[in-house]
């Protein structure tokens, strides 16, 4: 394969935009303000409800992730408590990646971003309403040269170089398979998407990917409530499946859960800090595996930039 390494224009917002709703895991309202940033600032998150000692901007980089099973939490440093971090950033980051936004200042007055409807669609709509501006600076994407494989139990995520015939893009195929005893939508479904740089796949992302909502099974939801999370939510606030299918709601699309998992992959891999040109083949991958892949992408791109 002989793909060249193109440079891509950096992008930010034209103006501020604000969103407010209850959070997902905690019983608290959250207000998020997203502001334009200068070229090279990257995407950062700041907690406006904390004292100045804990209110420094946190880079949207996987090196600042404190992982938990059901969301991505950014923290100021590796030894910082998640209580001073910003949780559930993946849906916003997915929408930003689809728009090609590389630089933005995100300010939130709570430990978690607004849930909105549990998808990326409201974030995408708000960002589009603010407008996207191309900056006078370029960013080099990560171009995968060698295959990578990350596994955790039954879950696996492959990162593969593009074939010579592939369009330069982040090609993702996600397989969700909870087994034959699960509701039909969670049994075996596959979602795929090719995200081209600089927002060139925006229409398809807006129509096919962004509306997919976060979800859980009824036993998972009960376990979260028992642990003190999501106590303020009731169906149909979120997409919950019992043995018969979704409770008090209908699916927005066939394979909505697999599509949401793909949406998460986009957001989590954006924590590598650069657009990615590669083929991703994931099966049952969650945030922890996605974060490991983002670490591996950074390490691989560094080794190719500085061969020993």
Image: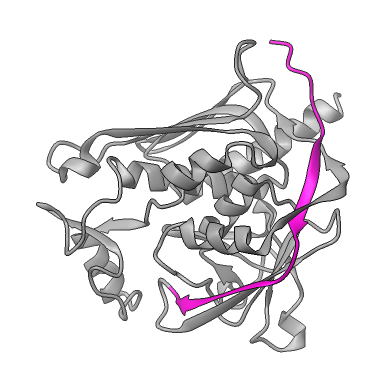
Say which of 58 and 252 sits in front.
252
Residue drawn at (30%, 65%), measured in percent from left and top? 238
Residue drawn at (55%, 57%), measured in percent from left and top? 124
Where residue 163 appears, x then y in whole percent? 61, 13
Q: Quadrant of residue 53?
A: bottom right
Query: So how many labels did they put on this image?
Result: 0
Where residue 31 appears, x then y in whole percent? 56, 80
The magenta region covers: 1-23
Horizontally, residue 221 falls left or right of residue 209, namely: left
Horizontally, residue 7 falls left or right of residue 277, namely: right
Q: Image height check: is 27 above or below 297? A: below
> Is residue 226 one of those drawn in magenta?
no
Where residue 9 appears, x then y in whole percent? 81, 42
Residue drawn at (40%, 72%), measured in percent from left and top? 25
Quadrant containing the C terminus is top right
Q: Residue furthest right?
A: 136
């Amino acid at each position: 394969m002989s793909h060249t390494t193109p440079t891509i224009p950096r992008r930010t917002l034209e103006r501020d935009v604000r969103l407010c709703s209850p959070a997902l895991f905690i019983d608290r309202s959250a207000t998020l303000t997203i502001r334009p940033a200068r070229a090279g600032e990257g995407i950062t998150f700041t907690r406006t409800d904390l004292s100045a000692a804990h209110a420094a901007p946190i880079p949207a980089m996987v090196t600042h992730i404190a992982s938990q099973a059901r969301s991505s939490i950014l923290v100021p440093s590796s030894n910082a408590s998640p209580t001073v971090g910003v949780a559930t950033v993946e849906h916003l980051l997915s929408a930003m990646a689809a728009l090609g936004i590389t630089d933005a200042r995100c300010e939130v007055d709570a430990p978690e971003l607004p849930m909105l409807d549990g998808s990326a669609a409201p974030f995408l709509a708000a960002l589009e309403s603010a407008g996207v501006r191309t900056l006078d600076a370029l960013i080099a994407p990560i171009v995968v040269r060698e295959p990578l494989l990350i596994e955790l139990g039954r879950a696996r995520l492959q990162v593969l170089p593009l074939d010579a015939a592939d369009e330069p893009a982040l090609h993702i195929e996600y397989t969700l398979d909870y087994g034959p005893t699960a509701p039909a939508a969670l049994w075996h479904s596959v979602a795929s998407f090719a995200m081209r740089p600089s927002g060139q796949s925006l229409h398809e992302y807006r129509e096919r990917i962004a509306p997919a909502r976060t979800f859980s099974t009824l036993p998972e939801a009960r376990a979260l409530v028992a642990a003190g999370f999501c106590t303020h939510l009731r169906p149909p606030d979120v997409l919950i499946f019992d043995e018969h299918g979704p409770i008090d709601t209908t699916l927005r699309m066939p394979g909505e859960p697999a599509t949401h998992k793909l949406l998460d992959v986009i957001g989590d891999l954006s924590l590598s800090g650069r657009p990615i040109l590669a083929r991703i083949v994931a099966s049952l991958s969650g945030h922890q595996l996605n974060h490991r892949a983002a670490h591996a992408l950074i390490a691989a791109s560094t080794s190719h930039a500085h061969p020993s």
